[in-house]
Amino acid sequence: MYMAVTHQVKVTVEPAFDPERSDPDEGRYFWRYDVEIANLGDRPVTLMDRYWRITDADGRQQEVRGPGVVGEQPTIKPGEAFRYASGCPLATPSGVMVGEYRMVGEDGRSFNVAIPAFSLDSPHGRRSLN
């Protein structure tokens, strides 16, 4: 599990390799990840946009930007959380994802919230200790 807190918003991500949607012989690897966005502050916040930077084991990067998450732009009240699940395909057996959400407070001001960097590891990758 990976976690970051920015501007009193906590983002927790739990990735898992999905063998059912992967085919290593064909160079297809898939991960699902669960995200929880918790409002630790005392005012509601609305998630407006997402940004992801995805890097595979060969160093290839792709960026994903768009409105909201899973078709929603949720408003998260103080003390509450929004949860969703998504997925990521790669052509390599491992990679890394990191990003941020653009949030808007009830005062209309926007701010960015960090999505912690998290590792996409499959049982098919070579392991090394650094």
Image (tube, rainbow, N blue to C red):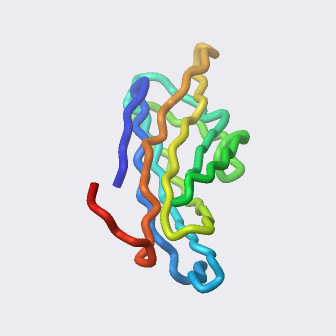
Q: Nearer the viewer, residue 56 or 89?
A: 56
Residue 53: image location, x then y, percent = 59, 44
User: Which quadrant does the C terminus fall into?
Assistant: bottom left
Q: Nearer the viewer, residue 116 or 56?
A: 56
Residue 101: image location, x then y, percent = 57, 35
Residue 11: image location, x then y, percent = 43, 42
Reply above or below: 96 against 106: below
Residue at 56% across / 58% down in the picture? 58
Residue at 43% across / 51% down in the picture? 118
Residue at 49% across / 53% down in the picture? 96
Residue 29 shown left or right of residue 43 in the figure:
right
Reply above or below: 91 against 58: below
Residue at 66% across / 53% down in the picture? 70
| Extreme-bottom residue of the structure | 25
Reply above or below: 29 against 75: below
Count the marks: 0
